[in-house]
Image: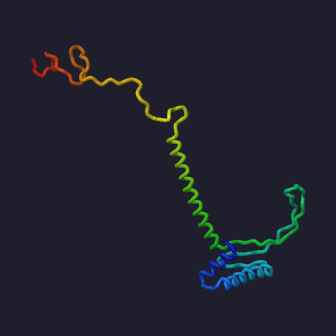
């Protein structure tokens, strides 16, 4: 977000002109810078702490040439977010993590589905094969053994217990 976008958002929300809002935003930034220069620290409750810190002189290497170079000490501005900001960022991280986990689970499910439907190497693409020999129908009765029918649709042999008209 740029300063111009901040000015527009504030202007739209509180009803001031963008020119007046821009002046207020710039004065706020100027006050922060002046306080940092004068005091080295500014704490904005529920937002965070800006602080000027001295970075010690050190030896480094020029990445292009590989030569050793001397880097003099310098002052840098650091920012430590307040609890409220950290909480909102943490919630953002958690939401992003949940979203990433859901995407990961969907990808895994798609991979599993693709693996199930993909043919195994060395097997035909279809899973059903036609029988190679014709199957003959089952006869109504099987051949007799010792004068007795042995299958479905048996017929009684006269003079045996299978004969319904007992002799």
Taking the image as shown, residue 24 lies to the left or right of residue 12, namely right
Give the residue at x 60% y 81%. Answer: 12
Residue 148 % position (x, y): 21, 17
Tell me the quarter of the image containing the C terminus: top left
Quadrant position of residue 129: top left
Q: Nearer the viewer, residue 87 or 149?
A: 149
Q: As displayed, is residue 123 above or below residue 4?
A: above
Residue 110 % position (x, y): 53, 48
Give the residue at x 23% y 13%. Answer: 146
Q: Nearer the viewer, residue 141 or 40?
A: 141
Quadrant position of residue 17: bottom right
Q: Residue furthest top?
A: 146
Q: Nearer the viewer, residue 127 or 106?
A: 127
Colouring style: rainbow
Residue 56 % position (x, y): 85, 67
Tell me the quarter of the image containing the N terminus: bottom right
Q: As displayed, is residue 104 above or below residue 81?
A: above
Give the residue at x 53% y 42%. Answer: 115
Q: As displayed, is residue 89 above or below residue 130?
A: below
Taking the image as shown, residue 6 lies to the left or right of residue 122, namely right
Taking the image as shown, residue 150 lies to the left or right of residue 112, namely left
Residue 30 % position (x, y): 75, 81
Looking at the rendered structure, the number of numbered marks drawn on it comes to 0
Taking the image as shown, residue 161 lies to the left or right of residue 144, namely left
Quadrant position of residue 150: top left
């Amino acid at each position: 977000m740029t300063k111009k976008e901040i000015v527009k958002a504030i202007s739209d929300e509180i009803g001031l002109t963008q020119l007046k809002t821009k002046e207020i935003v710039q004065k706020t930034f100027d006050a922060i810078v002046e306080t940092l220069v004068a005091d080295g620290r500014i704490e904005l409750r529920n937002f965070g702490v800006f602080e000027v810190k001295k970075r010690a002189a050190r030896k480094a290497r020029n990445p292009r040439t590989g030569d050793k170079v001397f880097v003099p000490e310098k002052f840098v501005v650091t920012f430590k977010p307040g609890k409220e900001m950290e909480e909102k960022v943490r919630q953002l991280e958690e939401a992003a993590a949940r979203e990433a986990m859901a995407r990961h689970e969907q990808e895994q499910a798609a991979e599993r589905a693709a693996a199930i439907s993909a043919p195994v190497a060395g097997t035909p693409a279809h899973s059903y094969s036609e029988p190679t020999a014709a199957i003959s129908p089952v006869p109504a009765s099987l051949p007799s053994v010792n004068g007795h029918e042995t299958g479905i649709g048996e017929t009684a042999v006269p003079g045996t217990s299978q004969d319904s008209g007992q002799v």
